[in-house]
């Protein structure tokens, strides 16, 4: 997974996120585009909301999200930023309600809850050790 955050503004930023979704099912529905909330705790207030595009649930599917985003809560985003720069690794909780569509059947809404373990940058630790 790669993540590029550019053009930071007081109210938002530009995000490019490239990830791979994997499915081990013998069925290959389309996951319809949906709004996903990202938080640091399960069910927590989101630090960012993004639009996930349609994706075919194959064995391995690359998903690219690239958009200008508004920050729903600056305090939550500040907490996320602190985690990034002070952690070796941390969890982000992604949740949403996409619809799954399998050819010939009606689309059904599902609860999507995923824990994403991300690599931190440990910038604070490096700065403290160098002083």
Image (cartoon, rainbow, N blue to C red):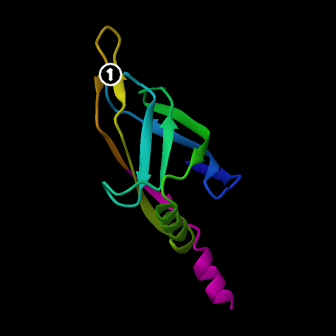
Q: How busy is the neighbourhood of tag 1: few (under 14 within 10 Å), some, or many (20 plus)?
A: few
Q: Residue at x 58, y 42 (%)?
A: 18
**Quick one: quadrant of the C terminus?**
bottom right
Q: Closest to the observer: 10 or 31?
A: 10
Specify whether residue 14 is painted magenta: no
Q: Which residue was labeled with disc 1?
A: 27
Secondary structure beneath label 1: loop
In the image, is 44 to the left or to the right of 36?
left
Q: Residue at x 42, y 36 (%)?
A: 22
Question: Whole-percent x and y of residue 1?
Answer: 55, 48
Question: How many callouts does the rendering have?
Answer: 1
Task: Report the span colored magenta.
Answer: 115-131
Q: Is residue 82 above or below residue 98?
A: below
Q: Residue at x 58, y 36 (%)?
A: 64
Q: Is residue 57 above or below residue 68?
A: above
In the image, is 23 to the left or to the right of 88?
left
In the image, is 38 to the left or to the right of 70?
left
Question: Whole-percent x and y of residue 43?
Answer: 31, 54
Q: Quadrant of residue 95?
A: top left
Residue lying at the far top of the rendered structure? 104
Residue lying at the far right of the rendered structure? 7
Q: Closest to the observer: 96 or 57?
A: 96
Residue lying at the far bottom of the rendered structure? 131
Q: Residue at x 68, y 56 (%)?
A: 8
Question: Whole-percent x and y of residue 119?
Answer: 52, 62
Specify whether residue 128 is painted magenta: yes
């Amino acid at each position: 997974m790669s993540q590029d955050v550019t053009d930071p503004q007081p109210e938002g930023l530009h995000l490019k996120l490239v990830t791979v979704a994997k499915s081990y099912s013998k069925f290959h529905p389309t996951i319809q585009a949906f709004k996903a909330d990202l938080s640091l705790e399960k069910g927590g207030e989101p630090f960012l909301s993004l639009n996930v595009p349609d994706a075919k649930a194959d064995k391995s599917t690359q998903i690219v999200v690239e958009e200008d985003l508004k920050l729903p809560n600056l305090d939550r985003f500040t907490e996320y930023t602190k985690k990034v720069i002070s952690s070796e690794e941390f969890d982000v909780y992604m949740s949403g309600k996409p619809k799954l569509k399998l050819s010939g059947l009606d689309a059904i809404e599902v609860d999507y809850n995923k824990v994403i373990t991300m690599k931190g940058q440990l910038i604070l630790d490096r700065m403290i050790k160098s002083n």
